[in-house]
Amino acid sequence: MARPVQLAPGSLALVLCRLEAQEATGGAEEPGGRAVFRAFCRANTRCFWNSRLARAASRLAFQGWLRRGVLLVHAPPASLQVLRDAWCRRALRPPRGFRIRAVGDVFPVQMNPIAQSQFIPLAEVLCCAVSDMNAAQIVVTQESLLEHLVKHYPGIAIPSQDILYTTLGTLIKERKIYHTGEGYFIVTPQTYFITNTTPQENKRVLSGESPRMPTSITYLDTESGI
């Protein structure tokens, strides 16, 4: 089992609220977390009369931005202690347009990693590969598909030609991919299936009889123009 990972260790949380004048003139757009962080650092690094605070603010790192105006910052322990002391003495300066409502220590959030299986379904890998190659406008043939797997999926066992052919055929039957004279393509919501089935064949299918000729399917993709 994977060991738990500690997230946001050694962090301070600053609960901010916008000044009323800023709310009235600032519009509906809320400033981003990094912009608020830079404004906070700028306000405190300019405290030239308090060299300890200015130095501590210059060592801060942006840790995160939560909704409702909570700024998470990280720094070496000594620098965080300087910020705590400055807050206690009401010397900590807020970012412009805000006031600081509270400052406190954040207990690390524990994440338990989810283990992954060693097995990667070949059908899933082929669909991902075909999709990536379609997006890159690379013609997808069985040969180019195998080359793509070797280059971009080094951790999987490369299938034989027979296994590749069989798996691609299964994906076509499941209507996950389709094949034309221009290669293999991923079936998307914009792909239309036109089945060329005569009324007589439909009657045989409904009566349980096997049609003499296999049903042919034409694929039309509105995005690629096929």
Image: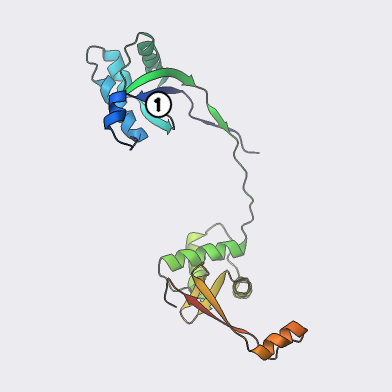
Q: Residue at x 46, y 63 (%)?
A: 132
Image quadrant occupied by the C terminus = bottom left
Residue at the extreme front: 24
Residue 177, above or below 37: below
Residue at the spot x=50%, y=80% of the render? 180
Is 146 displayed left or right of 49 in the figure? Answer: right
The residue under the point 63% across, 85% down is 215
Which of the 4 image quadrants contains residue 30? top left
> Is 52 drawn above or below residue 183 in the view shown?
above
Q: Position of residue 124 (x, y in %)?
A: 58, 62
> How far across and down, in percent of the image, does residue 144 sit?
48, 72
Q: Amino acid at mark 1?
A: Val
| Picture quadrant of residue 175 | bottom right
Whether residue 97 is visible, yes or no, is no
SS at badge 1 = strand
Residue 24 lies, in percent from the top left, at 29, 29
Q: Image quadrant for the N terminus?
A: top right
Left/right placement of residue 14 relative to residue 27 reads right
Q: Is residue 143 left or right of residue 41?
A: right
* Number of numbered labels in the structure image: 1
Q: Which residue is mark 1?
A: 73
Residue 200 appears in the figure: yes
